[in-house]
Image (cartoon, rainbow, N blue to C red):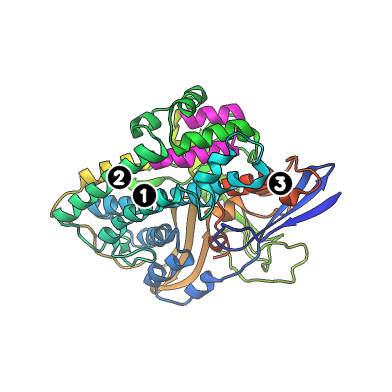
C-alpha cells in the first residue's frame, strides 16, 4: 500500500489537499482535506442580526449572492414577512446570473483546461483542446470571459455591485428597476443567449433544454460544433460516464423562490432505488470526529464552530454534514435530477452520478436559467414595490436554505433581542468534500475517488483531477 498526497490543487477557490491510499494501482481509500480555517461564524456572534447581510456575503467572492440570500432567508423566517413579488423576481434574476457565471467559469476556466495536458498527447482531439481550452492562452477564454462580464452587468442593475452587494433583504431588493433598466436587462440576456447559441452550444437553447436521453445527447455531440459538443466527444473517448460515481443520494433544498414555489423544487432522490421524497432538512447533523473542531452538538442550530488543530484522527477543517446519517451529493446534478429533467434522469439511470453527469447538468442548467431569467424579466411589474418592509425580529432559532451553483447552502441562526447568539453555515462544498464521520463513512468525493485506477504514480493521474473538479470545490466556503 502506498500513500500519495496531491495538493494544493490549482484552479480552486481556497486550499484543497487529497490523500490517496493506493494498492496495486487502485485507490482503496481517499481523504479530502480543507486545510484553511477562516471563522466567519465567530465574526457574526454578538452582532445585530442585520449584520449577517453584510458579513456573510464576504465568505466568498464568487457565490456572494447565495450567501446573502441564505442570510436573508434566515431573517425572513424570523420576522416573518412575505417578500414583494417584484423583489423575488429581481432576486432570482441576480442569483441566476451569479450561478450561470459560476457554471461558465467552471467549464471554461477550471474544468476544460485539464484536457490540454500533455498526458493526452496521443489523443486525436488533444491539439484542438489545447488551442481552444488551454489555461491562459486558449481561444475560448477570449469569448467566454467577456460574455460572462456582460451577463454580470445584470448585477449592477439590480444590486448596485458584485460581489458583496448590500441590496438583498428579507423582503426583496432595495433598488426598484425603471423601465429603462428592464429594457437593458432584456438586451443583456439577448446578448448572452447569442453567445451561448453561437459558441457554447452552437444550437438554439430550446434544442439543448429539450434533450431527453443519452441517445439524443450523443447525436447532439456529433451534430453540433460548439464547445459543449467538444466536451461530450472528449468525455465519450475518456469514458467519463464511468468515472467518479458518487454516493447515490442527491439533495436539493429548492431553487429560485417564486409566489407559487421554487422554479426547481426541493427533494431527496435515491438514484439506486429511484425514490424521490421531500427532503428531511430537520434531520441534518454535523459530525466533527475527523475535523479539526472541538466536540459540539450535532444539530447545526445548536452547534458551535471552534477549531482544535490537535484533535486526534482529524484531517480537515470541514465538518461532515449528514442527512439521516448518510452522505449526500449536492449541486446542479441534484437540482435537475430532483426537478425530473429527463436527460439528467437518463444519465443517472445509465451510470449514476459521474463526472459526465455533473458537467452535463451544470452546462444544461445554464440554458435552463437563461430561459428562466427571460421569464422573470417579462414578469416584472412596473411601479410595484420591490421590497416589503422589515418586521420585528422574533427570538429563537431559525434556518434558511438556498441553492448556490455548487448546491445546497444552509444558514442556521439563533437571535435574542435582535442580536445573533449562534450562527452556523453548511456550504455545498462542505457536503461534497466532507471528511469521514464517526462510523468511518467517507464523504461524497472520497467515495467517488475510491476504486479509481491510477497506476503507481497517482499524483500525475489526470482522472483524479477530473473527478475532483467535477464537484467544483470552493474551499473558502467549506471552512467559511
> For mark 3, what is the residue?
461
User: How far apart are the alpha carbons under marks 2 and 3?
Assistant: 39 Å
**In what element is the residue under mark 1?**
helix
Quarter in which the C terminus is drawn: bottom right
Q: Magenta region, mostly helix, strand or loop?
A: helix
Q: What stretch of residues is rendered in magenta?
A: 343-367
Front residue (pair 239, 291): 239
**In what element is the residue under mark 3?**
loop
User: Looking at the image, is mark 1 or mark 2 earlier in the sequence?
Assistant: 1
User: How far apart are the alpha carbons under marks 1 and 2?
Assistant: 7 Å
Assess whether mark 3 and mark 1 are in contact (beta carbons under 8 angstroms): no
Q: Which mark is residue 373?
A: 2
Q: Which mark is residue 96?
A: 1
**In front: mark 2 or mark 3?**
3
Magenta includes 363?
yes
**In front: mark 1 or mark 3?**
3
Front residue (pair 114, 125): 125
Q: Residues within 10 Å of mark 3 (few under 14, many from 20)?
A: some
Amino acid at each position: 500500500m502506498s500513500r500519495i498526497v496531491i495538493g494544493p490543487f490549482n484552479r480552486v477557490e481556497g486550499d484543497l489537499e487529497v490523500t490517496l491510499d493506493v494498492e496495486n494501482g487502485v485507490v482503496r481509500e481517499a481523504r479530502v482535506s480543507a486545510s484553511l480555517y477562516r471563522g466567519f461564524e465567530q465574526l457574526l456572534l454578538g452582532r445585530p442580526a442585520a449584520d449577517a447581510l453584510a458579513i456573510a456575503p464576504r465568505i466568498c467572492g464568487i457565490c456572494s449572492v447565495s450567501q446573502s440570500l441564505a442570510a436573508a432567508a434566515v431573517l425572513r423566517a424570523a420576522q416573518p414577512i412575505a417578500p414583494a413579488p417584484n423583489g423575488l423576481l429581481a432576486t432570482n434574476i441576480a442569483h441566476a446570473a451569479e450561478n450561470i457565471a459560476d457554471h461558465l467559469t467552471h467549464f471554461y476556466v477550471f474544468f476544460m483546461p485539464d484536457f490540454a495536458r500533455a498526458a493526452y498527447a496521443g489523443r486525436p482531439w488533444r491539439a484542438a483542446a489545447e488551442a481552444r481550452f488551454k489555461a491562459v492562452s486558449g481561444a475560448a477564454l477570449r469569448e467566454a470571459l467577456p460574455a460572462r462580464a456582460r451577463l454580470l452587468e445584470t448585477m449592477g442593475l439590480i444590486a448596485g455591485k458584485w460581489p458583496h452587494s448590500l441590496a438583498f433583504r428579507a423582503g426583496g431588493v432595495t433598488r426598484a428597476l425603471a423601465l429603462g433598466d428592464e429594457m437593458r436587462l432584456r438586451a443583456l440576456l439577448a446578448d448572452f443567449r447569442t453567445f451561448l447559441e453561437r459558441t457554447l452550444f452552437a444550437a438554439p437553447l430550446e434544442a439543448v433544454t429539450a434533450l431527453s436521453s443519452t441517445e439524443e445527447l450523443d447525436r447532439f455531440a456529433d451534430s453540433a460544433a460548439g464547445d459543449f459538443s467538444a466536451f461530450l466527444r472528449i468525455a465519450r473517448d475518456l469514458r467519463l460516464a464511468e468515472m467518479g460515481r458518487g454516493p447515490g443520494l442527491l439533495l436539493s433544498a429548492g431553487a429560485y423562490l417564486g409566489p407559487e414555489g421554487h422554479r426547481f423544487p426541493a427533494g431527496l432522490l435515491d438514484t439506486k432505488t429511484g425514490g424521490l421524497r421531500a427532503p428531511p432538512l430537520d434531520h441534518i447533523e454535523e459530525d466533527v470526529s475527523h475535523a479539526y473542531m472541538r466536540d459540539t452538538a450535532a444539530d447545526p442550530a445548536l452547534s458551535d464552530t471552534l477549531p482544535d488543530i490537535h484533535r486526534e484522527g482529524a484531517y480537515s477543517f470541514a465538518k461532515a454534514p449528514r442527512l439521516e446519517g448518510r452522505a449526500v451529493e449536492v449541486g446542479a446534478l441534484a437540482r435537475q435530477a430532483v426537478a425530473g429533467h429527463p436527460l439528467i434522469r437518463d444519465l443517472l439511470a445509465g451510470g449514476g452520478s459521474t463526472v459526465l453527469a455533473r458537467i452535463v447538468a451544470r452546462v444544461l442548467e445554464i440554458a435552463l436559467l437563461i430561459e428562466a431569467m427571460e421569464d422573470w424579466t417579462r414578469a416584472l411589474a412596473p411601479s410595484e414595490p420591490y421590497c416589503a418592509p422589515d418586521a420585528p425580529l422574533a427570538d429563537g432559532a431559525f434556518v434558511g436554505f438556498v441553492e448556490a451553483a455548487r448546491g445546497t447552502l444552509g444558514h442556521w441562526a439563533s437571535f435574542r433581542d435582535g442580536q445573533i447568539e449562534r450562527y452556523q453555515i453548511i456550504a455545498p462544498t462542505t457536503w461534497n468534500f466532507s471528511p469521514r464521520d464517526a462510523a468511518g463513512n467517507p464523504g461524497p468525493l472520497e467515495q467517488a475517488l475510491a476504486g479509481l485506477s491510477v497506476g503507481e504514480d497517482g499524483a500525475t493521474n489526470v482522472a483524479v483531477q477530473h473527478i475532483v473538479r467535477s464537484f467544483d470545490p470552493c474551499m473558502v466556503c467549506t471552512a467559511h
